[in-house]
Amino acid sequence: MLVRDAMSTVVLTIGPAHTLRQAARLMAARRVGAAVVLDSDASLGILTERDILNSVGLGQDPDLETAGAHTTTDVVFAAPSWTLDEAAGAMAHGGFRHLIVMDDGGPVGVVSVRDIIRCWAPARRHVTTVA
């Protein structure tokens, strides 16, 4: 199975000046765990739910902290044609849970560990226990 088969095509793009609260609201509204942060120079980064959680856990004010201050800019990008094994390997090697999927020079999706597990896990079956 390929990344294109597992990825979410909902790509939330925000600017680095968005506050963490604004980012969290947008992520919650779209039910995504990461936002692509697009800077004015067209560089891409990623802000994840964990980045927001870490900031709040440190006692930082989500109304004052900006996405740009918490964005990961050393991003590993995936191609839609990658296998899920390649994507999982990149995540395991890099220690992260989301990959921005790039095609034709722009983001076309995000694939997460949860997306991969959903594809790899067998369909849930109702198991009846006989006593």
Image (spheres, grey):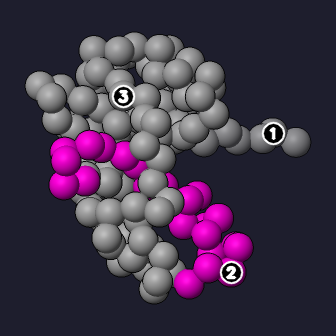
Q: Residue at x 63, y 34 (%)?
A: 95
Left or right of 15 on screen, residue 112: right
The disc, 3 or 1, on the residue closer to the chain's N-terminal end is 3
Q: Which mark is residue 77?
A: 3
Q: Quadrant of residue 15?
A: bottom left
Q: Quadrant of residue 23?
A: bottom left
**Residue type of the residue flagged with mark 3:** Phe
Q: Residue at x 43, y 79 (%)?
A: 21
- Give the SS element for disc 3: strand
Any magenta on residue 30?
no
Disc 1: CA contacts within 10 A as few (<14), some (14-19) or many (>=20)? few
Closer to viewer: mark 2 or mark 1? 2
Name the residue furthest front: 41
Q: Which residue is label 2 attached to? A: 59
Q: Which residue is label 1 attached to? A: 130
- Give the SS element for disc 1: loop
Q: Which quadrant does the N terminus fall into? A: top left
Position of residue 38 measured from the top left corner of the image (x, y, whole percent): 25, 52
- Give the SS element for disc 2: loop
The disc, 2 or 3, on the residue closer to the chain's N-terminal end is 2
State the separation of the CA atoms marked 3 and 1.
Answer: 48 Å
Nearest the viewer among 52 and 111 is 52
Disc 2: CA contacts within 10 A as few (<14), some (14-19) or many (>=20)? few
Residue 106 visible in image: yes
Position of residue 86 measured from the top left corner of the image (x, y, whole percent): 47, 14
Boundaries of the magenta span: 39-61
Residue 6 visible in image: no
